[in-house]
Image (spheres, rainbow, N blue to C red):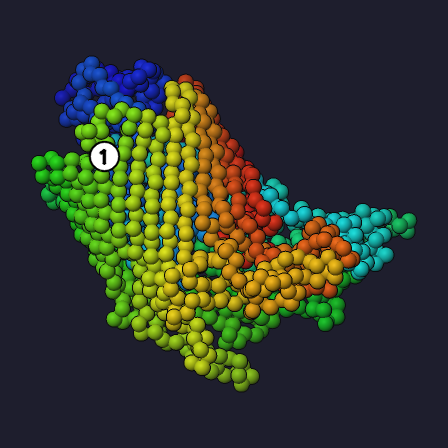
Amino acid sequence: MTLIVSGLAVSAQTRTYHGTVVDATTSEPLIGATVLPIGGGQGVATDVDGKFTLNVPASVKQVKVSYVGYAAKTVTLQNDMVVKLSSSDSDLDELVVLGYGSAKKLGSVVGSVAVVGEKQLENIPTATFVDALQGQVAGLSILSGTGDPGAPSNAIRIRGVNSLNAGNTPLFILDGAPVSSTVFTTLNPNDIQNITVLKDAASVAVYGSRAANGVIVITSKRGAMGERPKVTVRANYGWSQMVEDNVEMMDSKQYIEFRDRIGSPVSDNIRDLVNKYGISTNWRDELFNSSAPTYSIDASVRGGSENLNYYVSLNHFNEDGISKYSNMRRETLRAALNVKVNNWFRVGLQSNLGYTKYRSTSAAATPDGIDLNNPMVLARLALPYDSPYYYHFDENGNIIYGDKAQALHYSVNNPYTPEFNKSIWNRYRSRVTANVNMFEQITPIDGLIIRAQQAVDGYDERINWETYPYESFVTPMGDLIGNPTKPVGFMNTGANQQIFSRYYSFTYTNTAEYNFNINDQHNFTVLAGQESIISRENGFGAIVRGYTDKRTMLLTQGVTVTPSDLTQTIVNETFNSLFFKLNYDFSDRYFFEATYRRDGSSKFAPGHRWSNFFSVGGMWNAKKEAFLQPVEWLNELQARVSYGTTGNSSIKNYLYFGSVKPNDEGYGKEQVSWGLWNPSNPDLTWETVKSFDAGLHFRVFNILSGEVDFYKKTTTDMLMSIPWSYTTGFSSGAGNIGSMTNTGVDVTLNADIIRTKDWYWGVRANFNYNKNEITELFNGRDFYTLASTGLRYQVGHSAGEYYAVRYLGVDPRDGKQMWLDKNDNVTKVYNEEQNSVMTGKSQYAPWNGGFGTNLRWKGLALQLDFVWAAKKYMMNNDAFFLNNAAQGLQVNQSTDMLDVWSKPGDVTMHPGPSEMVQFDDRLIEDASFMRLKNLTLTYSLPKKWMEAAKLENVTLHFTGRNLWTVTNYSGYDPEPQTNMYQFAYPNTRQYELGVEVTF
């Protein structure tokens, strides 16, 4: 890049400089390059010809010139100067925030880290930024569990599962302070500058006991000192529909054929309805919206003066779910202000305030997952010859349709439709959140930074769960809606449940960091710090029943309430830490890092609350060696190794306490008795993860770059609910037991295939292989079966491996089901206890990753992102109902059941109605998948147009999410991370159009 500057002094206080910014290789002007004076004055951007005019105080001698895709450089202002800058082909100069202390260049980081930039986070059609991280980082597995906007759920894992019962979710840090999962939906993705994923002990050990599952550091946007004010406005509109559904349910004629095949034909009346009037309802299409709208609008302003910078943004987001009446609404306000009071004192404030309101679909979260009021269940099991509308016949026998049905006429128990449930339910959840932190920083001497930071992460949440009273009535189809044992006109009383909870966590962090060097070769950074986290949670709830008028639904206007209808929670938690970190490098070639942290937590028993964690690591920047300097095809080469320990305290509070519980079941519920509830464990302490990592980074031919990491993590003293003998009076108790390992490799490859002025084409791919293995359990046992889950913990196997009887199919001769016993013999007697075996199939995919491409021509750009998981299995509980002839007498079936066994000689996997389907391995399905997670097409209007309109940039975009999925899984969605899929809210395919204007 070439900078041509001419200067003219206009006064003793101010000088005006004119210049042009051009590409060093092509001499083409660079439009929108930033020219920022150092030491005072306002920065400017170049115009459509690459020119700028800069007015600066006479004391300013240098400027910093930067442009996206080019290496920034600081130059001295003088007349007719020429500065050549090269395009930036390396990411190693990128500054990253790892935790406490100053930001570091990515190329000087000893640990295994990955950075996801703001471009990847923009224009996300979902409410949470987590969705944009899928497939972007090797070793980071993110699986979306639901498409319900009212209950977003993501399983987030870094390099496998570290614990059996304690938490496995990484620690999230926002602008230097820990935050709870509420930030997932209350932080506007467009307010994020970048996200850094810390994977190994060297990078996370400074976080100690909270970092066993890795750390994800979020850095929010802010202005720059000297930056001119910049306003950005975005508006987006989109719509969503269900992802591909691999289950085809029977239509009416198919269902009649199925009933004929199993020898239980439907009535003649039903045959006439289907044959004469063609009633055949696709309940999936009826109950799910194929164009549920989503819209958002946000605006931000950023900038700065000589001694301060600022950033303010406001966002509104509204998303309707594909299941009727599910919805999320969000409002966020973010502000950041940093002030340079003088040369040695700085202060800053970052805040994010949010309000969210969720409406989930009726009974979507029922514990057994098979309530027909759940639309996900009704869409599968409702009989196809039920109509979504009431109907009757005129005197000529013609069918006349009426209003939307409030209950189904033929389906079992006459289930209510969402329309009726909406009329009697008022159910929502609202939350007000606050993430605020401020800092004070002094530099008393050169190289020494003393910093104090205070942060609060908190929310108030209210759950409103009202059921309105109504009188029983008969539908036009003759079905009774209301208590089936009571007559028409009976008052079905209402209920009102109100739950309120408040959570807040104060974090106080104080650090001192000293940077110095010896002989310009030996560079040292020493960090010492102290941190205290004080968390409080309070909540209460009440259910009142007996309402007879929907207009009087206050808690005080109900009739009945019992002690078990009242709840209250009080949780206090304290966390204290001391930590130290040493960084050393010699001539930017040899790097060494050591970390020590001592943590204390109130979650553990006295005498076991404190623990020590550490890490050591080294990195060799081989390309800096003299013998590799002449090797032109090798651009970068680094090798690193680290070892350290971290801890896990992600368990409930007070588990080491013995506790009691009220019981109101006796004495006619008039008196409350107390009984033992939880046993004490005075030895309960930390779960520890020991981690080893060795990695290599390279870039060759200035085209291909990559990283390869090998790791091994060993978890000891695992926190787990240990089963006890019932003779103790308890079924289980919390304790530290056993060990588990995760061994694997991360691989990342990036290639810049074409890079010219007008064209860019790059491809990228990453994957992780992780082998999880339990190496020790409790009390010398080699296995522990988890009842009613299909899982068993067994030494030498994965923590998520299924344990089941192996199903062979149906004997064509007699229609009996066949299984293998433990000795591989065929049997027709199902015995779960004696014949279950470890299947070798795990709910945790050992292989996962992502790949994608970026293609740009002038202002037009295309981005594709794919994610995948292999050897992932999931028990499909839905199939128990959909492929079950015995169930098929009452509920609809999948079209696979047209192959049901009905006579000797039929070769099939589906037995007739006389055979009971079992929870054997036929329900364990391969849920491996590949999904086109993101497709984004953008077009930036020509800069010459922007110059004429006095705008900096206008960009139009189209974004598609979950557009294409390849899987053999037969349920709604293969992506959720769960051992058993139970009629869950499916993920969504989304489309979005948007515009962004900057001026």
- The image quarter in which residue 363 lies: bottom right
- Left or right side of 447 for 744: right
Residue extending farthest right: 396
- Left or right side of 50 for 883: right
Q: Horizontal and vertical percent for residue 376?
A: 62, 54
- Amino acid at dot 1: Ala
Residue at coordinates 56% horizontally, 41% vertically from top-left?
A: 966
> On screen, 534 above or below 859?
below
Q: Which residue is mark 1?
A: 622
> On screen, 860 above or below 592?
above
Residue 650 appears in the rendering: no
Q: Which is nearer the eye, 581 or 181?
A: 581
Total tally of numbered discs in the picture: 1
Q: Horizontal and vertical percent for residue 819?
A: 62, 61
Q: Secondary structure at mark 1?
A: helix
- The image quarter in which residue 782 lies: bottom left
Residue at coordinates 31% horizontally, 64% vertically from top-left?
A: 686
Q: Which is nearer the eye, 678 or 214?
A: 214
Residue at coordinates 53% horizontally, 76% vertically from top-left?
A: 562
Q: Which is nearer the eye, 925 or 835?
A: 835
Q: Quadrant of the C terminus?
A: top left
Residue extending farthest bottom: 667
Q: Quadrant of the N terminus?
A: top left
Residue 566 appears in the rendering: yes
Residue at coordinates 24% horizontally, 52% vertically from top-left?
A: 615
- The image quarter in which residue 591 lies: top left
Judge the density around disc 1: few (<14), some (14-19), many (≥20) Cα neighbours within 10 Å: some
